[in-house]
């Protein structure tokens, strides 16, 4: 009982965060079932790791149990990259389960280290000794963290409201690579709390962002588009984009295939955009991009990128744009010019197919 109380005292803040996290998952209506399951597994993993860390340090304090400590240490060293992999699996849409495989490979190496000391060992004085691969756990966590932050940034809409939470998460994960060398083994005592708090705060930001996002593509939605057009005075270009052939896909392959097509194109547009270029889905197969402080050359480069990424898919789209230095032309006029160019391109596309828009 005394041990349980000591664990609760050391981890009470973490437990409160995890409980709050679990409650928010339960009451949130915006997330799909698979994401909620992944997040729940992540919460449970952090909780279990906190118990493992406590047991490891408790055994170290009372002395002895060297073999048991080695086994627990292998579990802890393995759990850290697995948890980062689970974060990647939970937060990144369309991420496949096999992203966890490298972390499992690291876990096998850690298990081998129980008998060989290749990663770690415990000497006769009960102290941790790094083996030839002693920094492998940090390399594993660092690699996963870099991939996670990169993918989250690539899938974001490059707006400050999304970049700040990603930067916060990067700071939290980065601390896990730096603080162990500053605080020593004591950092392990606060690792779970650090990850728990970081995930919870990022999740809150994520929920707040959902009111501005299109549920299917993850792009900014129609309401965000009208808000940004009204508020922003430094717009230099509008890009109108319309998918070609969505009706034919829906009629011949079903709406699931149509949704996949829209999602794929949305990823192309997001991937092509930069920090001052926002992407919106404003209708069924209609997209808009707003460029802030973007030069004519940068605009042309952006359109080339969009077309290049779309060409790599089985889909196509019609694109139009209007450029004008900030404040020199009315936004509504720019949008009309952009739409007019897009519709002209769309008409040319269907003309080449020898059919009309309705049948395509």
Image (cartoon, grey):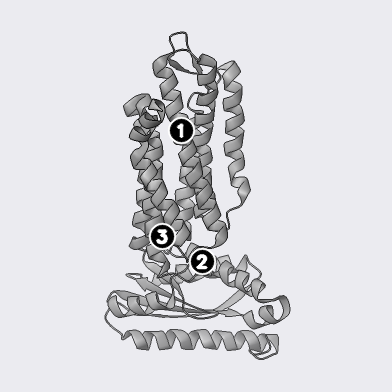
Dot placed on the residue nearer the N-terminal end, 3 or 2 = 3
The residue indicated by pointer 1 is 51
Secondary structure beneath label 3: helix
Of the residues tagged 2 and 1, which is closer to the observer? 1
For the residues labelled 3 and 2, say whether their Cβ atoms are less than 8 Å apart.
Answer: no
Is 302 drawn above or below residue 66 in the view shown?
below
Place of residue 260 in the rendered image (x, y in percent of width and height, measured from the top left): 62, 69
Frontmost residue, 241 versus 218: 218
The residue indicated by pointer 2 is 305
Secondary structure beneath label 1: helix
Dot placed on the residue nearer the N-terminal end, 2 or 1 = 1
Quarter of the figure that contains the N terminus: top left
Spatial distance from mark 3 to mark 2, Cα to Cα? 28 Å
- Tell me if 318 is positioned left or right of 180 in this view: right
Secondary structure beneath label 2: helix
Is 330 drawn above or below residue 165 in the view shown?
below
The residue indicated by pointer 3 is 206
For the residues labelled 3 and 1, say whether their Cβ atoms are less than 8 Å apart.
Answer: no
Place of residue 31 in the rendered image (x, y in percent of width and height, measured from the top left): 50, 63
Spatial distance from mark 2 to mark 1, Cα to Cα? 49 Å
Residue at 59% across, 43% down: 100
Of the residues tagged 3 and 1, which is closer to the observer? 1
- Can residue 139 be seen here? The reply is yes
Residue at 44% across, 35% down: 50
Of the residues tagged 3 and 2, which is closer to the observer? 3
Dot placed on the residue nearer the N-terminal end, 3 or 1 = 1
């Amino acid at each position: 009982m005394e041990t349980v109380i000591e664990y609760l005292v050391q981890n009470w803040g973490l437990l409160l965060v995890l409980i709050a996290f679990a409650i928010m998952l339960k009451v949130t209506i915006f997330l799909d079932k698979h994401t909620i399951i992944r997040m729940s597994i992540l919460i449970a993993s952090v909780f279990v790791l906190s118990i493992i860390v406590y047991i490891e340090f408790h055994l170290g304090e009372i002395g002895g149990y060297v073999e048991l400590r080695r086994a627990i240490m292998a579990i802890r060293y393995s759990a850290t990259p697995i948890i980062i992999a689970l974060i990647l699996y939970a937060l990144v849409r369309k991420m496949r389960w096999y992203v966890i495989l490298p972390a499992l490979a690291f876990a096998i190496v850690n298990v081998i280290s129980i008998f060989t000391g290749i990663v770690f060992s415990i000497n006769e004085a009960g102290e941790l000794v790094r083996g030839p691969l002693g920094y492998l756990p940090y390399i594993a966590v660092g690699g996963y963290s870099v991939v996670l932050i990169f993918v989250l940034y690539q899938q974001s809409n490059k707006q400050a409201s999304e970049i700040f939470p990603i930067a916060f998460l990067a700071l939290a994960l980065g601390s896990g690579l730096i603080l162990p060398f500053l605080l020593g083994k004591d950092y392990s005592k606060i690792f779970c709390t650090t990850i728990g708090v970081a995930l919870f705060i990022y999740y809150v930001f994520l929920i707040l962002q959902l009111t501005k996002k299109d549920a299917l593509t993850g792009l900014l939605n129609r309401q965000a588009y009208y808000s940004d057009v009204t508020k922003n005075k430094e717009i230099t270009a509008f890009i109108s984009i319309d998918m070609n052939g969505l009706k034919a896909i829906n009629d011949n392959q079903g709406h699931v295939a149509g949704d996949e097509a829209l999602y794929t194109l949305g990823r192309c547009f997001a991937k092509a955009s930069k920090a001052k270029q926002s992407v919106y889905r404003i209708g069924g197969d209609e997209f808009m991009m707003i460029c802030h402080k973007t030069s004519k050359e940068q605009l042309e480069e952006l359109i080339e990128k969009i077309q290049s990424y779309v060409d790599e898919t089985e889909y196509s789209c019609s694109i139009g744009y209007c450029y004008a230095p900030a404040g020199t032309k009315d936004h509504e006029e720019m949008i009309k010019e952009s739409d007019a160019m897009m519709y002209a391109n769309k008409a040319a596309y269907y003309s080449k197919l020898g059919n009309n828009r309705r049948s395509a």
